Image (cartoon, rainbow, N blue to C red):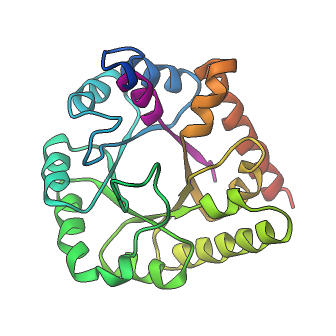
């Protein structure tokens, strides 16, 4: 099964906003990512608008033909924006004003009754809705219960540890991915993945999509954005080919 790559361009907007102007251009970044082989563009419209801005949404949508994945908090404001914007996909993520980046998965299990109507509204508008969760069976089951069509497994912990601890985290991801597939949901993964960590995750057979942003944007400073995307895609393809050849 082909493994898709969604490229998150939030950090281009972060750099733009540091000066408060229009450069670097997130639209140009989206086009460059697609040129390099991105299968989709991921953007996170945060409550504090620290990177992607409201005006970026229609501009990016008009600029590329690949699917757009809107990461969003489970708030009424973001629900209304998503319903007006109508991206291909919406990923519900936890959000704290004090965090530098998303620190962990959404606790879906404690919010089933709150999340179910949100997921229903987004799905009825034609969006594929995913839950960004830690690799935990209870969160997988809760994601199915709220009506999500997909789950994105948080790979941050896997990328942060080493040796035996990383092997443990990989097993957690593998077990969770199987649970997601068994529940009839699409399995995605992302957060913190880099050239040296993507292979083992990409080899998990149930995975359909990876979403990667920060590392690709950093690599793009030295390799160019199309080249960094192409290299990540090649590493993913090699890992998937190795897995299928076992």
Q: Residue at x 57, y 73 (%)?
A: 135
Q: Residue at x 29, y 30 (%)?
A: 61
Q: Is residue 246 left or right of residue 202?
A: right
Q: Position of residue 37 (x, y in %)?
A: 58, 29
What is the magenta range?
1-17
Eyeballing the image, is 127 above or below 58?
below
* Residue 4 magenta: yes
Q: Is residue 134 left or right of residue 245?
A: left
Q: Position of residue 74 (x, y in %)?
A: 25, 62
Front residue of 146 and 13: 13
Q: Position of residue 201 (x, y in %)?
A: 70, 57
Q: Residue at x 23, y 61 (%)?
A: 123
Q: Residue at x 38, y 17 (%)?
A: 25
* Residue 142 magenta: no
Q: Determine the image quadrant of residue 64.
A: top left
Q: Position of residue 224 (x, y in %)?
A: 63, 18
Eyeballing the image, is 228 above or below 150?
above
Q: Check the picture and name the quadrant holding the N terminus.
A: bottom right
Front residue of 160 and 25: 160
Q: Determine the image quadrant of residue 96.
A: bottom left
């Amino acid at each position: 099964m082909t493994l898709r790559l969604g490229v998150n361009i939030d950090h281009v907007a972060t750099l733009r906003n540091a000066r408060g102007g229009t450069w670097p251009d997130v639209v140009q970044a989206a086009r460059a990512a697609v040129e390099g082989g991105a299968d989709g563009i991921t953007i996170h419209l945060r409550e504090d608008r620290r990177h992607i801005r409201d005006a970026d949404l229609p501009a990016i949508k008009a600029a590329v033909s690949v699917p757009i994945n809107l990461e969003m908090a489970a708030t009424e404001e973001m629900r209304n924006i998503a319903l007006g914007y109508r991206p291909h996909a919406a990923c519900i993520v936890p959000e704290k004003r004090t965090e530098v980046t998303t620190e962990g998965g959404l606790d879906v299990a404690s919010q089933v009754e709150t999340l179910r109507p949100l997921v229903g509204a987004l799905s009825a508008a034609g969006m594929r809705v995913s839950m960004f969760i830690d690799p935990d069976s209870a969160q997988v089951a809760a994601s199915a219960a709220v009506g999500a069509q997909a789950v994105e497994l948080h790979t941050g912990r896997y990328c942060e540890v080493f040796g035996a601890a990383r092997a443990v985290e990989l097993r957690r991801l593998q077990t969770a991915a199987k649970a997601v597939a068994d529940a009839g949901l699409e399995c995605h993964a992302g957060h913190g993945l880099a050239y040296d960590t993507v292979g083992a995750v990409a080899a998990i057979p149930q995975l359909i999509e990876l979403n990667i942003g920060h590392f690709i944007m950093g690599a793009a400073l030295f390799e160019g954005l199309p080249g960094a995307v192409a290299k990540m895609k090649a590493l993913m393809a090699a890992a998937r080919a190795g897995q299928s050849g076992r």
